[in-house]
C-alpha cells in the first residue's frame, strides 16, 4: 500500500472497512468476525484518484471544426437533461478507471452538474463523487459573435453566467451558490473577454464569504496574476504563466491545476483546428516547460484532466488519466504525479480529511494495480480493482 504523503510502501496491509469508511489500517493478517474478505494478492494499493478539472457533461467533437462550432452544436442538439444522461455514461467510465472524485467545472448546461452530482450521491447512477461549480462566471467574449439574438440568449442562459461590473459578478456568485454550487469557477479571460482585477477580487471575496473555494481559468500571465493577487484557490491551465507569478502562488499556497491533455486527444484536436504537427509539438514543449518552472518555484500541483473531447478509441476515464502521463513526460517525478491526484487534489477541494490517502476515518476509496506506479506511472491507466466508499466497482 502506497502512502502518498511519505512516498513509502507499507507491506501487507489489512484495511478494515465499515460502511463507506476505513475503520482501521493494520498490518499482517487481520481477522474480523463476519466480515467479507477481499484478498488483493500482490496488487499495489493506492487511494482513489481525484480529477480537479473535469467536464463530465461535455463531449465536443473535433470534427465539428473547432471549440466554437462544437459548443454551438452541443447547445443546439442537447438539452440539459440529455447532457446529464451523457454525464452519467462518462462518469461511470471515469470511475471504472479509478477516478473516485472529480471537481466538475462547468460546460454542463443549466445546473446539469448539480443534477448528476445528486443522482450519484443518491445511488441512482454510478459515478465518482462530484464537487460542482454550476455555470462558470465569464466576461463577455467573442467566441459566439455573430449569433442571432435567440441563439445568443441560449448561450447566456445555459452555458455561461456572463457578468460585467462588480455588482453583476457578485450577483453571479450568489446565484451559483443558490443553484447548488460546491465551488465557484471564473474565467478571468476568455476569447477576447477579460474580467477586471476588481471584478476578480469581488468574485473571490464573495466566494470565500460563502465558504466556497474558487477556481480561476487563466491562460496568460496577466489573467493569472490578477487571480493570484485576488487570492483565488487555484489557477486552471496557466499555459503562459510567468516565473514571478509562480513564486507568488507558492508564497500564497495557491494550487496550479495543470491541464495537460493526453497526446492522442491533443493531436486530434489540434489537427482539427488546423495546426501542423510541428506547431503542436512546439506548443507542447512550451507547456511542459512551465511544469518544470512550477515545481522549481515550489508551487503545489493538483491534477486536472480538462477532458471534454470525444475520442473514438478511449473511454473518458482513459482520456482523463492519460493526462497524468503528460506530467511524467514533462519531467514530474512519479511520486509527485501521484500526489497531484491524491493528497494535493484532496487539499485543494478541502476534502483532505475525507479522501486522498488510506487512513482510518477516511472514505474507503481504494484502487489496485498489478505493477508499481512509482516505477512506471503508466500503471495508473491499468486499475485492476476499484472501490468507492466501500462499494466494489471493479475487481479482477
Image (cartoon, grey):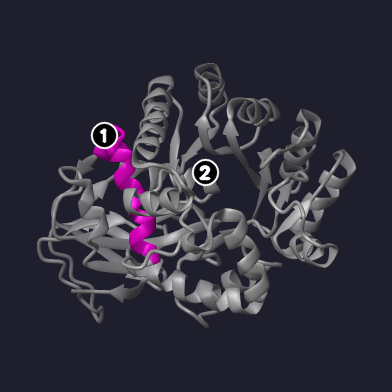
Q: Secondary structure at mark 2?
A: helix
Q: Position of residue 147 (x, y in %)?
A: 77, 59
Q: Is residue 335 magenta?
A: yes
Judging depth in this view, the residue of 157 and 14 nearest the camera is: 157
Image quarter where the C terminus lies is bottom left
Give the numbered dot on residue 348.
2
Q: Which residues are magenta?
A: 316-336
Residue at label 1? 333
Q: In the image, 153: left or right of 79?
A: right
Q: Position of residue 282 (x, y in %)?
A: 37, 32
Judging depth in this view, the residue of 136 and 342 nearest the camera is: 136
Q: Secondary structure at mark 1?
A: loop
- 10 Å crowding of disc 1: few (<14), some (14-19), many (20+): some
Residue at screen point 62% across, 64% down: 108
Q: Is residue 5 visible in the rendered structure shown here?
A: no
Give the numbered dot on residue 106.
none
Residue at screen point 47% across, 59% down: 62
Q: Tag 1 or tag 2, which sits nearer the N-term?
A: 1
User: Residue lying furthest left in this view?
Assistant: 42
Q: In the image, 89: left or right of 156?
A: left
Eyeballing the image, is 317 above or below 37? above
Judging depth in this view, the residue of 270 and 157 nearest the camera is: 270
Eyeballing the image, is 15 above or below 76? above
Q: Do labels 2 and 1 touch, CB within 8 Å?
A: no
- 10 Å crowding of disc 2: few (<14), some (14-19), many (20+): many
Eyeballing the image, is 264 above or below 58? above
Judging depth in this view, the residue of 282 and 208 nearest the camera is: 282
Amino acid at each position: 500500500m502506497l502512502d502518498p504523503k511519505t512516498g513509502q510502501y507499507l507491506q501487507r496491509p489489512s484495511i478494515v472497512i465499515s460502511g463507506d469508511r476505513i475503520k482501521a489500517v493494520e498490518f499482517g493478517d487481520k481477522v474480523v468476525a463476519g466480515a467479507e474478505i477481499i484478498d488483493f494478492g500482490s496488487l499495489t494499493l493506492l487511494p482513489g484518484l481525484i480529477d480537479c478539472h473535469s467536464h463530465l457533461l461535455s463531449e465536443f467533437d473535433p470534427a465539428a471544426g473547432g471549440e466554437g462550432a462544437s459548443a454551438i452544436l452541443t447547445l443546439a442538439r442537447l438539452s440539459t437533461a440529455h447532457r446529464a444522461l451523457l454525464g452519467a455514461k462518462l462518469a461511470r467510465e471515469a470511475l471504472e478507471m479509478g477516478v473516485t472524485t472529480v471537481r466538475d467545472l462547468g460546460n454542463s448546461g443549466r445546473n446539469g452538474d448539480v443534477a448528476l452530482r445528486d443522482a450519484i450521491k443518491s445511488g441512482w447512477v454510478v459515478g465518482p463523487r462530484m464537487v460542482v461549480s454550476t455555470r462558470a462566471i465569464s466576461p463577455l467574449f467573442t467566441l459566439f459573435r455573430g449569433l442571432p439574438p435567440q441563439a445568443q440568449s441560449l448561450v447566456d442562459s445555459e452555458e455561461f453566467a456572463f457578468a460585467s461590473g462588480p455588482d453583476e459578478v457578485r450577483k453571479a456568485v450568489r446565484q451559483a451558490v443558490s443553484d447548488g454550487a460546491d465551488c465557484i469557477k471564473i474565467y478571468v479571460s476568455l476569447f477576447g473577454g477579460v474580467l477586471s482585477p476588481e471584478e476578480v477580487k469581488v468574485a473571490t471575496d464573495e466566494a470565500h464569504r460563502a465558504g466556497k473555494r474558487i477556481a480561476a481559468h487563466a491562460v496568460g500571465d496577466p489573467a493569472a496574476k490578477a487571480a493570484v493577487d485576488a487570492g483565488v484557490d487555484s489557477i486552471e491551465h496557466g499555459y503562459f504563466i510567468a516565473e514571478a507569478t509562480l513564486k507568488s502562488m507558492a508564497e500564497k499556497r495557491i494550487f496550479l491545476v495543470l491541464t495537460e491533455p493526453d497526446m492522442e486527444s491533443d493531436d486530434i484536436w489540434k489537427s482539427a483546428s488546423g495546426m501542423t504537427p510541428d506547431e503542436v509539438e512546439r506548443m507542447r514543449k512550451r507547456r511542459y516547460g512551465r511544469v518544470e518552472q512550477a515545481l522549481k518555484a515550489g508551487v503545489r500541483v493538483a491534477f486536472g484532466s480538462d477532458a471534454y473531447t470525444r475520442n473514438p478509441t478511449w473511454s473518458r476515464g482513459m482520456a482523463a488519466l492519460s493526462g497524468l502521463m503528460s506530467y511524467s513526460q514533462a519531467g514530474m517525478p512519479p511520486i509527485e504525479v501521484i500526489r497531484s491526484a491524491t493528497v494535493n487534489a484532496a487539499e485543494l477541494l478541502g476534502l483532505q480529511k475525507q479522501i486522498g490517502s488510506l487512513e482510518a476515518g477516511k472514505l474507503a476509496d481504494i484502487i489496485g494495480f498489478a505493477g508499481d506506479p512509482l516505477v512506471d506511472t503508466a500503471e495508473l491507466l491499468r486499475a485492476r480493482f476499484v472501490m468507492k466508499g466501500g462499494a466494489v466497482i471493479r475487481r479482477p
